[in-house]
């Protein structure tokens, strides 16, 4: 749940050899899973908020602009920062979320403030010494602009950055312009609602794992539900995505973070990230993260295997580093099943827990610094307990009600798209 490098970060998988990065037992026919992300427009043209410069350039004229951006902040193949600078926009400060403005920091790595070498503009890290822009950070800014591609999942931290920026803007009487982008997982809503006892950096608000909102819609929810501290209201203007609806497939033109480097990984991420709270590798340390699952302890139970290696900028010290992991290969899993069923895949979680020989280790996040707390990822204590107790998928889903249905009803108030 993190970002990646230089302002337009192409998915340059050729820079690593497959053998060096993952000793996965695959054939050449599997190489299709490593294709770069390419934008799809199936008989329609989606125009992101950033691409509609004619709608917001007048709002920037004569103002000192702060930009909350990362490598996904592009207009066609040019970064929004470069595009606006060429148009004479006075960008005085850049703010970067997790992974940094240039996106070259690995997941969870704190990022320092710096001067951006390409533009000479000061870059403030919102994933380092402080997560919320300070009054000093905003003192020379007239208008803040937020343009970051999200993937529609509660534990993906960019919506946290949005909340912190809105909080700072509200408290310092700054307006916020949001250049909206499609949600690649916006076609469904699923998972338990976050329990307030489990609020953390990977879950701040009472929403399900898959929330079904764009960044602009979520910003309206933060304001509308009074979720900012002291119930302050942030003055926002949203440039909507043109010709978009939530059911529309959207393949990202730029990877949103180092370990979401294929469209397959982005669509499997809501389910597979839950495995970060288990003693199984999700493929970090390979060129195909979030499309495989496995552990050394599953040898003899699964024939497919892969070996995580250290990869700079992606996973320097991955779980089970240099150990052969056995499990599931989901790189060619038919994503149309997901679009049809519109639910998280609990079958894999149930199956792998049941197959794991030492069940006391499965959820024990004390075994590795590379593991997360499963309860915080799930947002509830009950899911882990239900898996251990052998509950069925149907029983587990029933426990998410009535919260999930109530959320869906509340969500409708803030929709900008069908």
Image: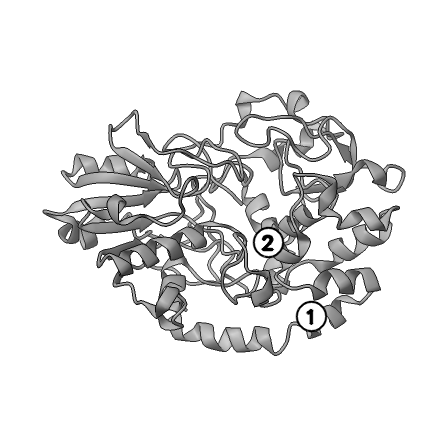
Q: Residue at x 61, y 37 (%)?
A: 33
- Percent position (x, y) of residue 396? 73, 69
Foreground of the two, 52 or 239: 239
Q: Residue at x 54, y 27 (%)?
A: 13
Question: Would residue 414 appear left or right of 327 to someone viewing this image?
Answer: left
Asked where in the image residue 75 lies, by quadrant, the reply is: top left
Judge the density around disc 1: few (<14), some (14-19), many (≥20) Cα neighbours within 10 Å: some
Question: Would residue 50 appear left or right of 102 to someone viewing this image?
Answer: left
| Disc on the earlier residue, 2 or 1 | 2
Q: Secondary structure at mark 1?
A: helix
- Percent position (x, y) of residue 336? 61, 55
Q: Is residue 270 visible?
A: yes
The residue that disc 2 covers is: 270
Question: Would residue 131 appear left or right of 287 to someone viewing this image?
Answer: left
Disc number for residue 397: 1
Q: Residue at x 30, y 67 (%)?
A: 233
The image quadrant where one finds the C terminus is bottom left
């Amino acid at each position: 749940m993190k970002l990646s490098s230089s302002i337009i970060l192409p998915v340059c998988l050729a820079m690593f050899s497959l053998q060096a990065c993952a000793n996965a037992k695959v054939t050449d026919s599997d190489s299709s899973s490593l294709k770069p992300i390419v934008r799809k427009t199936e008989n329609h043209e989606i125009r992101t908020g950033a691409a509609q410069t004619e709608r917001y350039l007048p709002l920037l004229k004569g103002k000192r602009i702060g930009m909350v951006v990362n490598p996904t902040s592009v207009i066609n193949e040019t970064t929004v920062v470069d595009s606006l600078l060429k148009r004479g926009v006075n960008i005085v400060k850049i703010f970067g979320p997790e992974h940094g403005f240039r996106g070259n920091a690995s997941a969870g790595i704190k990022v320092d403030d710096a001067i951006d070498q390409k533009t000479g503009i000061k870059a403030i890290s919102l994933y380092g010494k402080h997560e919320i822009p300070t009054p000093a950070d905003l003192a020379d800014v007239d208008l803040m602009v937020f343009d970051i591609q999200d993937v529609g999942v509660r534990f993906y931290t960019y919506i946290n950055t949005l909340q912190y920026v809105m909080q700072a803007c509200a408290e310092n009487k700054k307006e916020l312009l949001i250049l909206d982008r499609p949600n690649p997982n916006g076609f469904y809503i699923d998972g338990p609602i976050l329990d307030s006892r489990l609020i953390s950096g990977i879950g701040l608000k009472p929403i399900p794992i898959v929330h079904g909102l764009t960044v602009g819609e979520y910003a309206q929810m933060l304001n509308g539900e009074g979720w900012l501290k002291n119930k302050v209201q942030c003055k926002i203007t949203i440039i909507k995505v043109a010709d978009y609806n939530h059911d529309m497939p959207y393949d990202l033109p730029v990877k949103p973070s180092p370990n979401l480097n294929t469209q397959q990984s982005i669509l499997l991420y809501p389910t597979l990230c839950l495995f970060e709270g288990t003693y199984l590798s999700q493929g970090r340390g390979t060129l195909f993260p979030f499309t495989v699952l496995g552990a050394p302890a599953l040898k003899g139970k699964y024939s497919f295997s892969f070996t995580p290696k250290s990869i700079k900028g992606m996973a320097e010290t991955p779980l089970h580093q240099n150990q052969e992991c056995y499990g599931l290969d989901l790189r060619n899993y038919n994503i149309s099943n997901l679009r049809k069923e519109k639910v998280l895949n609990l079958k894999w979680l149930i199956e792998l827990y049941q197959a794991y020989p030492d069940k006391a280790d499965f959820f024990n996040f004390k075994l590795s610094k590379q593991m997360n707390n499963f309860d915080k990822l799930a947002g509830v204590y009950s899911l882990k307990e239900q898996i251990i107790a052998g509950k069925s998928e149907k029983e587990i889903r029933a426990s998410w009600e009535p919260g999930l249905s109530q959320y869906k009803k509340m969500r409708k108030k803030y929709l900008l798209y069908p």
